[in-house]
Amino acid sequence: MNAGQLLHLLQFASPALPIGGYSYSQGLETAIERGLVRDAASARDWIAGYLHEVMALWDAPVLWRLMGAFGDGDLAAVALWSERFIASRDCAELRAESIQMGYSLTRLLAELGVGEVAVLGPEVALPTAFACAVDALGIDHRDALVASLFSWAENQVLVCVKSIPLGQVAGQRLLLSLAPEIEAAAALAQQLADDALSNWSPGLSILSMRHEVQHGRLYRS
């Protein structure tokens, strides 16, 4: 990867990108509210468990397939995996999160003149828009997958820093400790066959539904 590609990847993977990633906790706020996550150790258990049981088995493999579909110019496969990803969001907040950030990233790509966003359609999942950017900028798919997982983990750590709360040093220590977990999740996501993918996470779904009626929320999911 050359310096230009690396800079593009850092830009589009960052939760600070103006697509609203920092405003979502993906159920973590409710886990903190209910005492399931209360310190650095339980925060690491939560993030690592989510990473291996949800991200590595569904979100990351779907992103991997979307990047491959864009690389092959297979718009039918792009539509298929985008539709499946949206259908996998089994509560209102998680679905709205992916659609809102997908829409925002698609608009940003259009304004920057990156990728053929017109082919994406009116309802775009975040992984689809991200894969479109990766293909348009010629970024290596493996690097993009790791960056996407790191961005997700960084955002989860930031939620913990703000809401448990954890200190900044504790947050950085937590993020550093997750590096092997992120690498393992990325490796698994690249190897899974289609019939091995799974979005089965009922506990997370219940927490996300509870978040919809939680009092005093800071995050949108």
Image (spheres, rainbow, N blue to C red):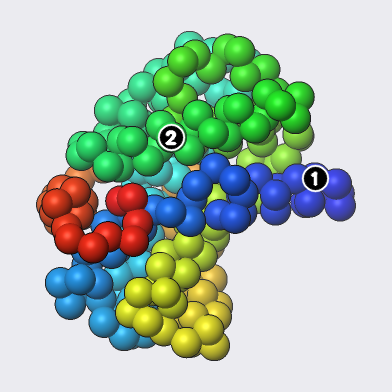
Residue 213 higher or lower than 67, as above or below:
below
Report the number of numbered marks.
2
Q: Which residue is drawn at 80% across and 45% down?
A: 5
Residue 167 higher or lower than 58, as above or below:
below
Residues at marks 1 and 2, CA–CA distance in whole angstroms: 26 Å
Q: Which mark is residue 13?
A: none
Going by the numbered disc 2, the residue's amino acid type is: Gln
Q: Residue at x 36, y 22 (%)?
A: 83
Q: Does 213 sit left or right of 105 as displayed?
A: left
Q: Does 126 sit left or right of 198 as displayed?
A: right
Which residue corresponds to mark 2? 100
Which of the 4 image quadrants contains residue 134? top right
- Give the SS element for disc 1: helix
Going by the numbered disc 1, the residue's amino acid type is: Gln
Which residue corresponds to mark 1? 5
Q: Nearer the viewer, mark 1 or mark 2?
A: 2
Residue 200, given in percent of the width and then of the height, sits at 20, 45
